[in-house]
Amino acid sequence: MGTNGSNGLNEQQPIEPVVTPVNGQVWCALAEIGRQLQILANAHMGQGNFAPSSLPPPAYAPDSPTVVELVNQFLLAKARAGKGDRYIRALRNSLSKFVPGRANQFAHEVTADDLEKWIVRPEWATQTQRGYLSDVSIMFNWAVRRKLLRDNPCKQVELPAADDGEISIHQPGEARTVLNFARGYDLNLCRALACRYFAGLRTCETDRIEESAFREKYIEVTKDTAKGGRARRRRLVTLQPNLRAWLALGGELPILNSGQKWQYFNTALKEETGLEWLPNVARHSFCSYHIARWNKMGTTANESGNSEAMLLKHYREISFKGFLVTKQAATEFFSIVP
């Protein structure tokens, strides 16, 4: 991954296609289009038995693509527009779930019923279902803007009911284990993890933040640092004493090729310690312990880049797998040093 949110893609280096279709549907469609154009031409010249049709206009443009063609055109357009690697990978992951079984189906043939049958799967959590459907809807909206389709079928889909989901955190002992393992594995990753645990930085923020953002008393997170994430405002995060101690070990941010390095690290962590890395667990830990330690919702909201409503919904009086986040546990968490 490139730094500063660059995705490193251009017209000479197109992104990898999701699927490669091979059948004759496209040629059949072109033949049908040619036949319809001939009928229209005859009508204008007063020839043939043409009569105005009472049928509604088609839900697609004459060059309506197949599903896989639409996916690849959409991803390539996002890459050319300079969207970040993380964002494009997330889109590609969602859309690759949508393509199987309909790769060669014309995009205009996809219905709301098809989408509802696809999205409701027992192995997908409700939040995952809504996320995948949201990404597919973004693609269809793009196709409408490009005049490849006349409508977005996702608009008629009944969304699965949202649930609060479970916030995953690490107990102080688990966070200590992760950091000590990272210390011996890679100091750059250790530095990033310490910032995620004790300053609440998002993964995308530690992937972009420069060393110049570290000041004597705080870390400055700009909107450019958070580009591609949900944060859009500059914020200052207090440098806790224990975070200073971890930063003093060395390392440097941002991390080049971070995606692959984190993947290898997570695998090694599980093999060596038995701990399985959970999505956003370090940031969730920060928010939970910060509220319990200082009991100042506004301060936690400002430093984490979340709203107070979000904190109240997800982090107040949190427990995870029977472990309750108390002030005592929070004090222990912010006392973890090398």
Image (cartoon, rainbow, N blue to C red):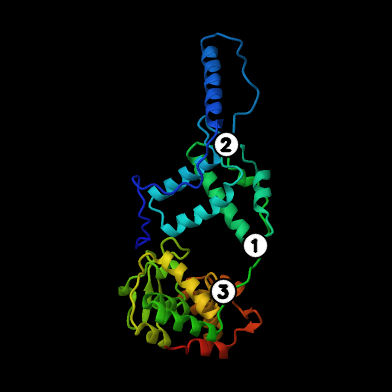
Compute the Cα span from label 1 to label 3. Answer: 21 Å
**Within 10 angstroms of label 2, few (less than 14), some, or many (20 or more) residues?**
some
- Residue 194 vs 37, above or below: the answer is below
Left or right, 139 with reference to 14: right
> Where residue 267 is drawn, which disc sits there?
none
Distance, label 2 to label 3, CA atoms, is: 43 Å
| Residue 57 visible to the viewer | yes
Q: Are marks 2 and 3 in contact (CB under 8 Å)?
A: no
* Residue at mark 3: 311
Instruction: Label 2, secondary structure: give it.
Output: loop
Of the residues shown, which amino acid type is indicated by label 2? Phe
* Numbered badge on residue 106: 2
Residue placed under numbered mark 1 in the picture: 125
Foreground mark, 1 or 3?
Answer: 1
Residue 46 in percent (x, y) is at 54, 9
| Disc on the earlier residue, 2 or 1 | 2
**Percent of width and height locating residue 313:** 61, 72
Give the residue displayed 53% in from the left and 34% down from the top.
64
**Kind of element beneath mark 3:** helix
Horizontal arrangement in the rendering, residue 150 relative to residue 54 (left or right): left
Disc on the earlier residue, 2 or 3: 2
User: Label 3 is placed on what type of residue?
Assistant: Leu
16 w.r.t. 335: above or below: above
Pointer 1 with pointer 3, Cβ within 8 A: no
Secondary structure under tag 1 reads loop
Which mark lies nearer to you, 2 or 3?
A: 2
* Image x and y of residue 149, in percent: 54, 37
- Image coordinates of residue 202 in percent, x first then y, are 46, 70
